[in-house]
Amino acid sequence: MTKHRIFTTSVASVYPHYVTKAEKKERTKSEVDEIIRWLTGYSQKELEDQLEKKTDFETFFAEAPKMNPSRELIKGVICGVRVEDIEEPTMKEIRYLDKLVDELAKGKKMEKILWKQ
C-alpha cells in the first residue's frame, strides 16, 4: 500500500496555511506554535528546527519528544472524517493537529483547545 502524500509533505509547507487560517480569525502564530508544542512536546527551538529542516509529517510525528496523551480526547470531524475513527496512526496525528488549528480559528479559548482545567 502506498503512503498518503501528506506523510511525505514537509510540515514547513503546510505551517504557513495553519498560521494564515488562525490570523484570518484574529488569532496568532504564537498560538499555532503553542498548539503544536502542546501536541508534540517539541520546544519552540525544536519546532523551528523541524520547520527549517523541512521535515515531513511522518518524521515530524515519529520524532516528536512526547505526544500529549490528552490528544486522544480530541473528537469531531475534520476534512469530512471523524478524527476518532481514523485508524492509521500518522494520519490520526495529522488530523489531531488540523482539528486543533480549526478550533483555534473558530475562536475557541486556548484553555478549551488544549484541554486545560
Image (spheres, rainbow, N blue to C red):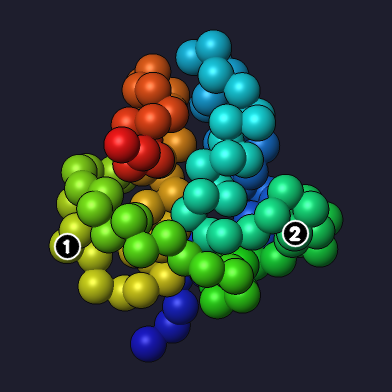
Specify whether residue 105 is in view.
yes
- Residue lying at the far top of the rendered structure: 26
Q: Which mark is residue 46?
A: 2
Dividing the picture into quadrants, the one containing residue 89 is: bottom left
In the rendered image, is residue 81 in sight?
no
The N terminus, quarter of image: bottom left
Q: Residue at x 31, y 74 (%)?
A: 88
Badge 2: few (under 14), some or many (20 or more) residues near its Cα, within 10 Å?
A: some
Closer to us: 97 or 34: 34
Quadrant in the rendering for residue 4: bottom left
Q: Residues within 10 Å of mark 1 (few under 14, many from 20)?
A: few
In the figure, is residue 36 to the left or right of 56? Answer: left
115 vs 47: above or below: above
> Circle 2 — which element?
helix
Which residue type carries mark 2? Glu
Which residue: 69% across, 55% down?
A: 43
What residue would you read off at disc 1?
Answer: 85
Please tell me whether residue 108 is drawn above or below residue 57 in the rendered image: above
Viewer-nearest residue: 116 or 80: 116
- Sequence order check: which comes first, mark 1 or mark 2? 2
Residue 110: x %, y % from top left: 43, 29
Going by the numbered disc 1, the residue's amino acid type is Asp
